[in-house]
């Protein structure tokens, strides 16, 4: 439930944006209340199960604090927040890929593999399959993975994805098509994952 300080800005992005630019503390708290859940949702869909998601949430809002003065249209506030979130996720994924090439880098698993209680056979299978899906998505080029995740898991329109990724519509179409083809080819090589996907689609 939003906190009391959000009431003065409820449903009014024009007033909220004005307050943000004036660096009003109440406006910033209302901004966080309004968009934190959405930012977290986008991060989880792009990053998958990841221990850094909460830290990245704070990073997104830190970037927002620095750049909100560039937003002119209140109607574009949510799209701007989405673009900022995608940029933060993309930077993190690219940084991780670079770190893998550094000597003595000790890579840790982002997912602790915990199985929800009670540990039914279906829950265990789903957890294992989702880990495989994440591993396959991790293997895709970052610029293909992000628009594909936004399309599959967030259901964004192509124009929204293009805006969030700061590329043309034609470019985002190419990246999604390329990502889908690569992901499908990888799934085909994993028999258990292939069968699980087929069952999920038919259910």
Image (spheres, rainbow, N blue to C red):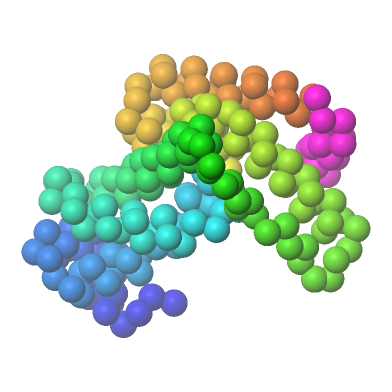
Quadrant of the image occupied by residue 38: bottom left
Residue at figure coordinates x 77%, y 63% from the top left: 115
Query: What percent of the width, then of the height, locates residue 11?
Result: 29, 64
Q: Quadrant of the N terminus?
A: bottom left
Query: What percent of the width, then of the height, locates residue 114?
Result: 73, 62
Quadrant of the image occupied by residue 148: top right
Quadrant of the image occupied by residue 159: top left
Query: What percent of the width, then of the height, locates residue 95?
Result: 43, 39
For this orientation, the residue located farthest to the front is: 104
- Return the residue nearer the eye: 52 or 29: 52
- Return the residue nearer the eye: 22 or 64: 64
- Return the residue nearer the eye: 10 or 191: 191
Q: Horizontally, is 84 left or right of 197 in the view?
A: left
* Rendered position, 14 above or below 171: below
User: Number of labelled discs?
Assistant: 0
Residue 188 seen in the figure: yes
Residue 193, magenta (yes or no):
yes
Q: Horizontally, is 155 left or right of 27 in the view?
A: right
Query: What percent of the width, then of the height, locates residue 88?
Result: 37, 45
What span is colored magenta in the figure?
Answer: 189-203
Q: Quadrant of the C terminus?
A: top right
């Amino acid at each position: 439930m939003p906190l009391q300080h959000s009431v003065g800005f409820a449903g009014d992005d024009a007033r909220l944006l004005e307050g943000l630019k004036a660096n009003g503390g109440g406006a910033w708290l209302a901004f966080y209340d309004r968009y934190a859940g959405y930012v977290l949702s986008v991060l989880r869909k792009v990053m998958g199960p990841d221990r850094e998601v909460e830290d990245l949430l704070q990073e997104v809002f830190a970037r927002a604090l620095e750049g909100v003065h560039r937003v002119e249209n209140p109607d574009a506030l949510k799209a701007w927040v989405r673009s900022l979130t995608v940029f933060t996720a993309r930077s993190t994924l690219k940084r991780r890929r670079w770190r893998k090439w550094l000597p003595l880098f000790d890579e840790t698993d982002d997912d602790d593999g915990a199985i929800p209680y009670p540990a039914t056979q279906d829950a265990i299978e789903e957890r294992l399959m989702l880990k495989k899906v994440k591993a396959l998505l991790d293997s895709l080029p970052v610029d293909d993975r992000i628009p594909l995740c936004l399309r599959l898991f967030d259901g964004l329109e192509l124009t929204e994805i293009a805006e969030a990724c700061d590329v043309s519509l034609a470019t985002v179409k190419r990246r999604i098509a390329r990502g889908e083809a690569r992901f499908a080819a990888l799934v085909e090589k994993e028999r258990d994952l292939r069968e699980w996907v087929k069952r999920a689609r038919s259910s």
